[in-house]
Structure formats: C-alpha cells, structure tokens
Image (cartoon, grey):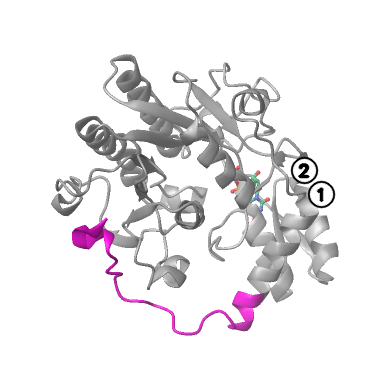
Amino acid sequence: MKNGKSKLVLVAGGAGFLGSHLCDALLSEGAHVVALDNFQTGQKQNLRHLEREPRFDLVDSDIIKPVPSRLRSKKMKFDEIFNLACAASPPHYQADPEHTMLTSVVGTHNLLTLAEDIGARFFLASTSEIYGDPEVHPQTESYWGNVNPTGPRACYDEGKRAAETLTFDFARAERADVRVARIFNTYGPRMRADDGRVVSNVICQALAGDDITIYGDGSQTRSFCYVSDLVDGFMRLMAYKGPFPGAVNLGNPVELTVGDLAQKVLTMTGSSSQIVTRPLPVDDPRRRRPDIALAKQLLGWSPKTSLDVGLRETIAWFADERSGSTKAARAPTMLQGAVAAGQA
Ligand code: UDP
C-alpha cells in the first residue's frame, strides 16, 4: 500500500511460470496487477483463475515492441515494473536466438525507459546463467562469470548480461530505481510439460513410464529452488528500502547431481522408467550453486521448501495435468479487468 492506495504493478512475462506466481503473490498483497505477455512460452491457462479478478488485467504484447499506449496513459502510473519476460529454458530460448537476445536488450530498455518516465521502481529477472560455466563455486555476486559469448547459450546469457548492464547504467545515472535478481534453477507447478528442463522432463517421463533422459553422465550439478520461495525473494527484493544493493542471487543452495535428481524422482513416483543417456549439450555448466549470503543479510531471505516437499508438490501437479482434471474450460479469452479500464 502506498499512501493508503494499493500499488499498481506491471509484470512483463506475467503469463509465464514465474510471472504467474508473482501475479498471485502481488494480488494477495492487495496490488493492482497488469500482466504483459507475448505468449511465446507464457500460457493463458496460468492466469485462468484470475479471469474475474477486478484488480487484474492481461495485455498481449511483446516487450521488444514499444510499450502499448494504453499502458502509458496517465491512469497507468505504475509504482513497480517487473521484467520477467524472456524464454528461459535452453530449447525454447535457442529456438529463436535473435528474438531471445533482443528480448533482453531492447525489451529491457523499453521497460527501463517506461520506469524512468513514470518514476516506477524497476526489477530485472536476471539469471545464474550470467556466470556461465563457473570457475568459482559456489557463485557469489562479485564473480564476473565464464560465458562463451558465441555459443548456443550466448543469446540468453549475453542477453541477460547486457540487460544487467543497461539496468546498472540507468541506476548509476539515477534514471531509475532498480533491483536485479540473479535467479538460479527454479521448479514447481505451472512449469510447462514441454519446457525441456531437467525437473519437468524427468517428472513427465517418470509419470508416463518413458525413458528418463540424462544428458552426459549425470554428474553435473544444479541447485533447485521451489517457486514460492523464489517469489518471496522477488517481493522482498523489490520492497528493499536501502540504496541499490547491486545484483542479488536468489536460489536454493542445496546442490545435487542431475543423476541423483533423476533417482529421487524415480523413487518418489514409483516409476519403472529406465535411465538413458544423451549427449551433453554444448556449454552446459558443470556445477552451479548460489551463495545467498547477500540475500540473507539484506532481505532476511532463505528458501524454506525442501526438495522432497517441493518435488512432491510438483509431481502431484504434473500428475493432475496428465489426468486432465485441471484442464476444464481452458483457453480463456483476453481478460478485461478494471485496471486496464482505468479504474485502478
Ligand atoms: N538435463 C538432463 N536431462 C534433461 C534435461 C536437462 O540431463 O532431460 C540436464 C542439462 O544438460 C543440465 C541440467 O540437466 O546439465 C539442468 O538443465 P536445465 O535445462 O534444467 O537447466 P539449466 O541447464 O538451464 O541449468
């Protein structure tokens, strides 16, 4: 709440996995929320439950294009702008690498300029990918990273690095009040079954009784954060009152190998799927674990959900999706909430 009035918040990428959970969290705190999405990887069904929510609206637009004029009207003075808009799974962001790069660079610039114009606080969803295949472990915010600038992951990694550069430059020039989160691997309900990432792949394969695909020998590590913990970190970072703290890692520091993750999912699902190996993708990072000392110190934040609890929730959600029980009345039309009607 600001001066007794609820906040008006723009969530770019609001129909995505993380964006839709963020919209829910903001609405539950009383905010008015406008989600903007081009539906490249975001899905209307993620926001289906908000169709009749008067404090919510959904706008179909790509952040690469100029921000739609209806979002630039006097009544649309956003207090906060979250930029979560970018395909984030390697197969999705590599499908159109040019678009991925421009989403991070041109799209972030468009939203930063809007934030500057209206005095909104700006939040960039950056990524642990900016550390590349890290030579420092665990990764602290002061590490500059080890990214191959010309490989197949570069469109995402370098795009996000450039988005951070732009965001820091706007902060240095005092053109916008900004926050930058470096997000580590995150999982939970509303991941797409075809997302292509290890958690969704392994769970869907185990539930279907299909072969579990492990890339390489499965000894590479990741650290998986449950989505509600991450969104709590987003909210705390955006609300942080001190001077710009630089980029802040948000992730779960519990590290395990991809092979161990697959075994865990096999055990939890009781699946008889077989593990098969596939070639390791080019530039696939060997190890990844966040150092979250800064988030702890600044935000009093650390993840609360254990991998067992989070995986149980996620497996149950995918099982539900498979059974079709949550698929009733899908494909909503565009939402027409009070916010876009100028009643915010
Ligand atoms: N991976 C795997 N099987 C899959 C999908 C991914 O073994 O079906 C591996 C992938 O090569 C990487 C790790 O799991 O080493 C995490 O991949 P993901 O795409 O989930 O995230 P990212 O590589 O972006 O951290």
Q: Secondary structure at mark 1?
A: helix
Q: Residues within 10 Å of mark 1 (few under 14, many from 20)?
A: some
**Residue 334 is one of the magenta-drawn residues:** yes
| Residue position marked by numbered label 1 in the rendering | 260
Where is residue 24 drawn, in percent x and y?
Answer: 49, 58
What is the x, y in percent for residue 81?
35, 41
Residue 19 horizontal side relative to residue 60, left or right: right
Mark 2: few/some/many CA within 10 Å (<14, 14-19, 20+) = some
Is residue 258 left or right of 167 when viewed as pictured?
right
The residue that mark 2 highlights is 257
Which residue occupies 55% across, 46% down? 231
Residue at image x 68%, y 34%?
286
Residue 158: x and y in percent read: 42, 30
Q: Distance of mark 1 from mark 2, alpha carbons?
A: 5 Å
Q: Is residue 249 above or below residue 324?
A: above
Residue 4: name its quadrant: top left
Return the residue nearer the eye: 313 or 25.
25
Q: Which of the pair 109/69 is nearer the observer?
A: 69
Q: Main secondary structure of the magenta part?
A: loop
Q: Quadrant of the C terminus?
A: bottom left
Residue visible at 65% across and 53% down?
198
Classify residue 330 by image quadrant.
Answer: bottom left
